Image (cartoon, helix red, strand yellow):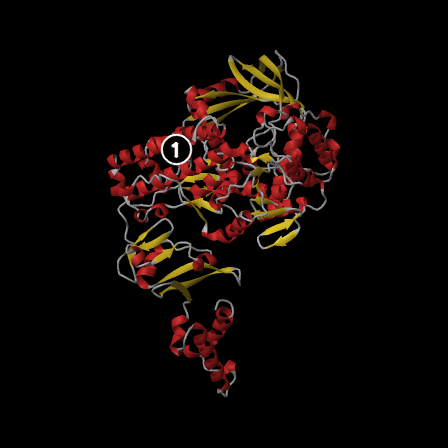
Amino acid sequence: MKLVIAEKPSVALEISKVIGASEKKNGYYEGNNYLVTWCVGHLVENAMPEDYSVEYKKWNLETLPIIPEEWKTKVSSKTKDQFRVIKELANRDDVEELICGTDAGREGELIFRLVYNQIGSNKPIKRLWISSMTRESIEKGFCKLKDGREFESLYKSAFCRSKADWLVGLNATRLYTGLYNKMLNVGRVQTPTINLIVKRDEEIKNFEPKQYFVVKADTGLFIAAKKFDGITEAYSIVNKCNGKDAIIKNVIKEEKNIKPSGLLDLTSLQREANKLLGFSAQQTLDLAQCLYEKKIITYPRTDSKFLTEDMKNETKDLIINLVNSNLLGENLREKYEIEAVKLESIINDKKVSDHHAIIPTNEVLKHDLSLTDSEEKILYLVAYKLLESVYKPIKQTNIKIDLGIEDEIFEFSGKQILDNGFKLIEKLMKEKLGIEIEEDKNSFEGEVNVGQRFENVELSSEAKKTQPPKYYTEDTLLSAMENVGRLVDDKELKESLSKGLGTPATRAGIIEQIIKKGFVKRDGKKLISTIEGKELMKILPEDIKSPELTAKWEYELERINNGELSEGEFLEEIKVYINSLINNAKGNLNKEFVKSKEREIIGKCPRCNKNVYEGKLNFYCEGGKECGFTLWKQDKFFTNAKKEINKSIAKKLLKDGKAEVKGLYSVKKDKKYDATVVLEDTGKFINFKLEFWWYNKIKNYGGRNEKYIIKNYFKHTINSFKNNNNSIWRYEINNRTYWRIFSFIIYYTYYLDFV
């Protein structure tokens, strides 16, 4: 009997179908001499400091650094039941071999090995290494199972990365939080990423625009221009040359073939999806993972843009089938020239390590794919990119023209398109995705020659300003993280930075993390640093927030994977750095930051009367766990009404026990309303209720709650009208009657909709 351990239930199901393990059991499948089970994320994780020693439970500067002598792992409390299933299966006497069927990458290898080690198994391991979830790929994978020992270095590299993140992140976070009495999260990769954004924002803030002037000469065929620093000189040239004849003094023509950019790896897919569709990096990764598990695209967590030689024929067939199918539209079938396809540019065995580029599978040719709109868009990007990458180049003539008017020279740079080449595919893709196609302003038609004359040329002057750098988007930030080596001149350091910050598989998570922790915020497509992010960068030393150190560690982790560096050597370097970081930080306290961050008292705790302060996610009592009072900014009561507890609301709740809140949202009525939110503290739990402005008018009718009060008042009003001999319309109009009539409105509007 062989035990296959997959990464997710959905993957386990697909594997079980292929290998004949068709009988569904509790937490696994069985059949055909196979057992197939699954992990649910990380079943086993790194132990926390308090798991090593009770003294680490309390954050104390004196206990730093925390460096375990012997590394511990533990079973996640959330997934212990599934771990128990795997352990029981692995320890069965009839199980002779374990097959690692987790994702074919560093993270997948780590997930399996941590489970394997936690079980304490010594049974032999085989590795299922596949790049797609199609039946054919799974069958081939099981026919060519690899020896688990071949992936020992991959596991060591992954575990080393995990340990490094734990050591640096945990020690640095506790260090700076303790020094500055404020929660300050520090991460091995996230901190340099925040710093990239903070630096860019500072450049934008400090940018001083300079005015300049452009004088344009419109020939009717093209517009030549000349730049001037001052308005006087610009106007002088306009007056001098306007309405005069112009002559082409010089023409430089250069024939150019522009090749397609190639296939997609994960980073380039995320960049394209952000640029064209506005998807976040994490959103794109999640969608790509779904498509992979549905067997529609190949493995997404790849850093290669190439395919292997043995894929040449099947890729050619796939391209032909894609073009002839209805998936990408009839326009494609009509316009795409199959004979123009050349695969040589995307085939390179040497540039494929663990996985090849992302391409569709043959499953994409099925009629009913049952995809969401977002999944379809990612699929279109992948499919069109395959067709584009093997298509003919754009052929164009680049033209530079010197235009003479009087004794002044105006310049024009443009191009004439001879063959749109792969640009055609890009245009069809944008049409399919509903993306606006921008007109190429530098393209023109017509013949130009030296000596050609244009009569009565009109001139105009336009004032312009130099522009600051653009804010990072996820597209440009991913590029900066990938190509961080461009920021340094040192050749050796460039080599260490060749892998960039993080990996293609982790960068999306890093971006989401720094946003979640409040160091960076989204503004449309822009990523902008917050006050918290800027403040954190002020107090951290240059080495931990610069990309050089982190990228060097990434490079060394890759060396571990290649068997060129030992785990012990790498971790020793990390330990030395942590000790140095702690010693330097304690001796170089930023006193200005400490002084500027004296905590504002939000109010008094209703339980113990101690001060309440603002945290990143909450408003908390200084009494800590002994008191336990906390107002969470994202309290469910408020988020359901599309609000959160801000500082102003918190102050009112603490002072008066209630706060008037405008613009609360009603799901039932799909509209906004105003009300008073009342805080009710049981001593253990915090609850909220609504009061409306009319509440005090009727509460004298008494009762257990608002529902009872409103119903009682409604009943009282009905009885009043019944006992009156006159018609309702002749009933005496006074204040009492006003409120009785209004009770009907209250009942029907509020009781039925809100209570």
Q: Is residue 492 visible to us here?
A: yes
From this viewpoint, which residue is outermost toward the front?
93
The residue that mark 1 highlights is 571
Front residue of 736 and 297:
297
Q: Quadrant of residue 400?
A: top right
Q: Is residue 451 above or below residue 7?
A: above
Count numbered badges in the picture. 1
Q: Is residue 371 visible to us here?
A: no
Q: Quadrant of residue 587?
A: top left
Q: Quadrant of the N terminus?
A: top right
Q: Is residue 687 above or below residue 510?
A: below
**Residue 199 locus on image (x, y percent):** 39, 33
Front residue of 193 and 120:
120
Residue 256 lies left or right of residue 492; in this view the side is: right
Callout 1 crowding tier (Cα within 10 Å): few <14, some 14–19, many ≥20: some
**Residue 735 locus on image (x, y percent):** 41, 77
Residue 369 lies left or right of residue 725; in this view the side is: right
**Residue 730 locus on image (x, y percent):** 50, 82
Residue at point 47%, 80% (across, down): 717
Q: Is residue 720 above or below residue 371?
A: below
Provide the secondary structure element on which disc 1 rests.
helix
Q: Is residue 562 above or below residue 687?
A: above
Identified by mark 1, the residue type is: Leu
Front residue of 554 and 140:
140
**Residue 67 locus on image (x, y percent):** 34, 39
Residue at point 65%, 30% (across, down): 388
